[in-house]
Amino acid sequence: MRERRETEVNIVYLTTEAVPFAKTGGLADVCGTLPSRVAGLGHRTAIVMPAFRSVHQSHAGVEPTDISFAIPMSPRKLVGCRLLRGRLPSAQDVPVWFIDQPQYFDRESLYGTATGDYPDNAERFSFFCRAAIQAIQRIGWNFDIVHCNDWQTGPIPSMLAADQNLSPALKNHATFMTIHNLAYQGNFPKSEFEWTGLDWQHFNQDEFEFYDRVNFLKAGIATADTITTVSPRYSEEIRTKEHGCGLEAVLENVSDRISGITNGIDQSVWNPKTDTKLAANYDAKSWQQGKLANKRALQQQFALEQSDEVPMIGLVGRLAEQKGWDLILPVLRWHLGENRPTQWIVLGSGDAQFEHELRALKEEHPDRFALHIGFSDMLAHRIEAGSDIFVMPSHYEPCGLNQLYSIRYGTIPVVTPTGGLADTVVDHNEISVADETATGFHLHTISPQGLDDAIGRALHLRYHHPQQWAKLIETGMTQDWSWKKSAMEYESLYAKTLALKSAAKRTE
Ligand code: ADP
C-alpha cells in the first residue's frame, strides 16, 4: 500500500454531478474541480457518482472494472451493479468511480424530464447511496472524510452510522454534507423510506422524518459531522424562515457545525486570455478591443443590429423561478417595447412558461434580442465575453458561478444582494468607489423596477463616467477567484473536523 504523509487526508466525494461527466448546474462545476484542487494541496481524493448516460457518452476514458456487487433493495428485489473507473481529465491523479446500474441511471436525463421528476427517484438515489458505501470499501484506500453533496447523498451519514459491518476503509471516517441548493431536498412519501434499507427507527424527527414524509437532505444535515454551504452569507440566510425552505429549525440546531465556503471557478477553463471558445482573447489591459470583437461576433451570429455603442445585456441560467425571471421578463419588455438603446442576449433552458414568453419577445424584436433555448457551453462563454452587463437577479443564490465568470470576463454583474451574489459582487457606491472595491451593482429593491433601476445605474456609469466604468471592470478582472483559496478553506475544515472527532472518541 502507498505510504501516507502525516498531514495527508483521504477524501471521497459522493455526488451525482461532476464536469465533464454529468452536469445540470453548479454542483457539477464544484465536484469536477474541488477534488483536484484539494489533491493539489497534498491530499488523496476520489469521486464516486452514478454512471448516467452522459458518462457513457463523455468519451473521457471510462473503463469497466471487475468489481460488481448487489444491493437488496427490498426482500424480493436484489439489484446488481458494477463499478466503472475513469479520471478527472483536469487531474489524472483523481480517480472517478461510477456506479453502473443501467435501469436506474441510463436514462435521458439525470433527475427527470420536462414533465416532472422520475417517479422512482427515492429508489434510484437510495440505491446510489447504498452502492456508493459498498464501492468506497472496495476501492482499496482508507478514507478519513466522506464528503456528501446535496439531497441525493443525504442518507449516507445515517447509513454509515447505522452500519455495523464497516470495513477498516471507513473505520475512522468523518462526514461532510455540503448544501449546494437547499430548495431541493429529496422529499418523498413516507413509504419510500423502505428503499434506504435502514431500520424504521431512523424515521424520526431528528433524522429522516419531515411532516410525516421522508426528507433525504434533512437526514444529511442532522447527522453529518460538518455541514457547509457554498457561500458564508447563504449559511446564515438558510437559518431564517425566508430562506430556510422549512428546514430553518434543523439548520439552527446544527449552527455550531455549519459554515460557508465560497466556490472558486476553474480559471483554466474560464480565462478570457486563453479561452478557445471566444472570437478574440483579451485580459485586463486589452479588454476594450477584446470585448468589442466578441460583441461584434455575437451580433453577427444572432443577426442583431451591428453597433459598437449599444450596450449588450447578457443572461445565462436555468429558466427557474429562483433565477428571477419574474423580474427579468417585465424589464426586458420595457427595454424592447420602449425601444430603449440596449441589446439583450439570453441563454437558458427549463420552465416551459418562461421559455414561451421569451420566444414571443424574440419574435417581436429579432434585431435587438438574441435567444438560445437549450444548453450550450460554447455560447455561455461567448455571452460572458461579448456582453457589457450580466444580469442575475436571483431570489436566492447559494453561491452562483455566472457572476464570477462575468467578473473574470470584464462584464459588469447586476445582482440581487443575496447569498453568494452578496458575498462576491461589491455594489458601486460612494464607499466602494473610494476604496476601489466596486465590481458591480446590487438591486436596492427586489422588484422589476428595482432591477431596471440597477441596470439604469450601470448604464449611467458606462455612458457618463467611462473611467469609473473601466475601473470596475479592471478591479474585477484582476481579482483571484481561483479554487485555491476555497480548497485551502476545505482543507482546514477537514482537519478541524477530524481533530474534533478524534478528541470526542478519546473522551468516549
Ligand atoms: P445553478 O447551479 O443554480 O444552476 P450557477 O450559477 O451556480 O447556477 O451555475 C450554473 C452553471 O451552469 C454555470 O456554469 C453556467 O454557465 C451553466 N449553465 C446554466 N445554464 C446553462 C445553459 N443553458 N447553457 C450553458 N451553460 C449553462
Image: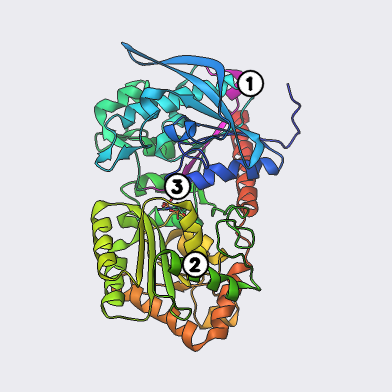
Residue 400 picture location, percent across and down: 46, 56
Q: Which residues are magenta?
A: 165-182
Residue at the spot 26% in from the left edge and 32% down from the top edge: 119
Which residue is label 2 attached to? 297
Judge: label 3 CB < 8 Å from ligand 1: yes
Badge 3 density bin: few <14, some 14–19, many ≥20, Cα 10 Å: many
Badge 1 density bin: few <14, some 14–19, many ≥20, Cα 10 Å: few
The kind of residue tagged 1 is Gly
Q: How many marks?
A: 3
Residue 40 picture location, percent across and down: 69, 43
What secondary structure is marked by label 2? helix
Q: For this view, does 261 lie left or right of residue 122?
A: right
Residue at the spot 35% in from the left edge and 44% down from the top edge: 184
Is 168 covered by the magenta stretch? Answer: yes
Q: Which mark is residue 180?
A: 3
Residue 404 picture location, percent across and down: 52, 61
The kind of residue tagged 2 is Ala
Quarter of the image containing the C terminus? top right
